[in-house]
């Protein structure tokens, strides 16, 4: 399909720079077979059924944004995927100033050697020393806010908490699974009282999620791989939900992509551990999920293509037109949508 089919006009003042306070007070646009309704996230327990299950991503964002020097050249690096114990693939700003074998000094006693270039333009960085890379990042890194926020204001101490979900446990993401930023302990208790189950899976979100689609046709775009895991016990419980007539609602496109990667043509979710580069566009037949809770996405992005595959392109164009007209806040810190095909 032509990528320009997924374009739409978005006023820049609708891009959220801070999350709603409290988190579950964010607005939520509900789209199902009955049309649209304007709700708030706190209404979620009344919108789901007893026996349904929400599936969250428990990845934790690491401070993966680094600023350093090679000689007199300033070099910026955003880690996006672990390749080994001390090696991470990174997107590098001013990459033309970095040659293979160069050592970049990121300050605070943290340095890394450029080992190779990837076909996607990334650079493989090998960190010096014996400490875990996560320890080095805590010392020298900062929270990697999405470019559409970072370009409008600097990262600050509030982001250290704001850009983590309440489920964040497994370190390794360089972007938050932002649909889950709306959840609070109070909302989780209300969901449990309503008979809605919850499960967690792990997908370490990479910086590739922010890269623009440069191809003119979706067939020519290649997704960046991300590492994920669903253990056997979780897979069994998820299968039992559907066998009992409940619906699996993915909280975020990251959970959705992992679930679909782990599910066979027979609709059975199996244990999964490894990389996935699944690219979901209209025409895809969903096997694992029955609905999606997600924020509002960039024009011409792979994520807008995904929601269009779930609900239909014309339907999502109407949903987003309603969101723009009614002042919904977009992107990572923005409002939510509940999509029930």
Image (cartoon, rainbow, N blue to C red):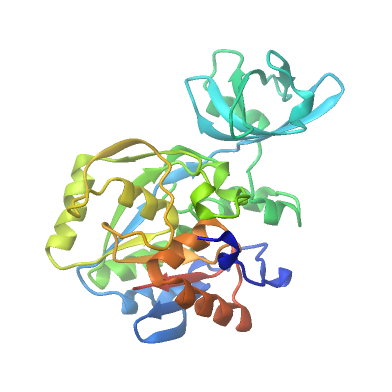
**Residue 322 position within the rendered picture, expressed as x and y whole percent measured from the top left:** 55, 82
Please give the name of the residue rendered at 75% of the width and 50% of the height, measured from the top-left corner.
154
Disc tally is 0
Q: Is residue 300 visible?
A: no
262 relative to 107, above or below: below
Instruction: Give the side of residue 189 with respect to residue 49, left or right.
Output: right
132 relative to 218, above or below: above
Q: Is residue 268 visible?
A: yes
Q: Which quadrant of the rendered structure holds the C terminus?
A: bottom left
**Residue 260 position within the rendered picture, expressed as x and y whole percent measured from the top left:** 32, 51
**Residue 101 position within the rendered picture, expressed as x and y whole percent measured from the top left:** 69, 13
Please give the name of the residue rendered at 54% of the width and 29% of the height, measured from the top-left corner.
134
Please give the name of the residue rendered at 20% of the width and 55% of the height, measured from the top-left corner.
267
Q: Quadrant of residue 128?
A: top right
Question: Most extreme residue toward the left, as rendered?
Answer: 244
Viewer-closest of 62 and 102 = 102
270 relative to 52, above or below: above
Instruction: Give the side of residue 209 with respect to residue 47, left or right.
Output: right
**Residue 58 position within the rendered picture, expressed as x and y whole percent measured from the top left:** 40, 47
Please give the name of the residue rendered at 63% of the width and 44% of the height, measured from the top-left corner.
144
């Amino acid at each position: 399909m032509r990528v320009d089919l997924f374009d739409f006009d978005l006023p820049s003042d609708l891009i959220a720079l801070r999350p709603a306070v409290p988190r579950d007070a964010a607005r939520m646009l509900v789209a199902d077979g009955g049309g649209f309704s304007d709700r708030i996230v706190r209404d979620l327990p009344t919108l789901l059924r007893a026996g349904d299950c929400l599936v969250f991503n428990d990845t934790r964002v690491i401070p993966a944004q680094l600023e350093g020097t090679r000689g007199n050249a300033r070099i910026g690096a955003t880690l996006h995927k672990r390749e080994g114990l001390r090696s991470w693939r990174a997107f590098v700003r001013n990459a033309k100033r970095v040659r293979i074998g160069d050592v970049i000094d990121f300050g605070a006693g943290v340095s890394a050697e450029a080992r190779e270039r990837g076909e996607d333009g990334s650079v493989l960085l090998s960190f010096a020393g014996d400490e875990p890379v996560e320890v080095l990042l805590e010392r020298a890194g900062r929270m990697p806010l999405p470019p559409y926020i970072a370009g409008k204001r600097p990262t600050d101490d509030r982001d250290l908490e704001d850009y983590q979900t309440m489920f964040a446990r497994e370190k390794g993401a360089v972007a938050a699974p932002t649909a889950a930023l709306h959840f609070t302990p109070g909302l989780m208790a209300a969901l449990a009282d309503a008979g809605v189950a919850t499960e967690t899976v792990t997908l370490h979100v990479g910086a590739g999620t922010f890269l623009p689609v440069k191809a003119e046709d979706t067939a020519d775009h290649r997704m960046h791989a991300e590492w994920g895991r669903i253990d056997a016990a979780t897979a069994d419980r998820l299968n039992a939900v559907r066998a009992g007539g409940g619906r699996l609602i993915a909280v975020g496109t990251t959970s959705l992509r992992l679930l679909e990667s782990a599910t066979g043509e027979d609709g059975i979710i199996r244990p999964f551990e490894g990389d996935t580069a699944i690219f979901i566009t209209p025409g895809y037949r969903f096997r694992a999920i029955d609905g999606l809770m997600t924020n509002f996405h960039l024009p011409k992005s792979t994520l807008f293509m995904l929601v269009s595959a779930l609900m239909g392109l014309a339907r999502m164009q109407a949903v987003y037109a309603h969101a723009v007209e009614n002042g919904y806040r977009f992107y990572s810190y923005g409002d939510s949508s509940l999509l029930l095909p």
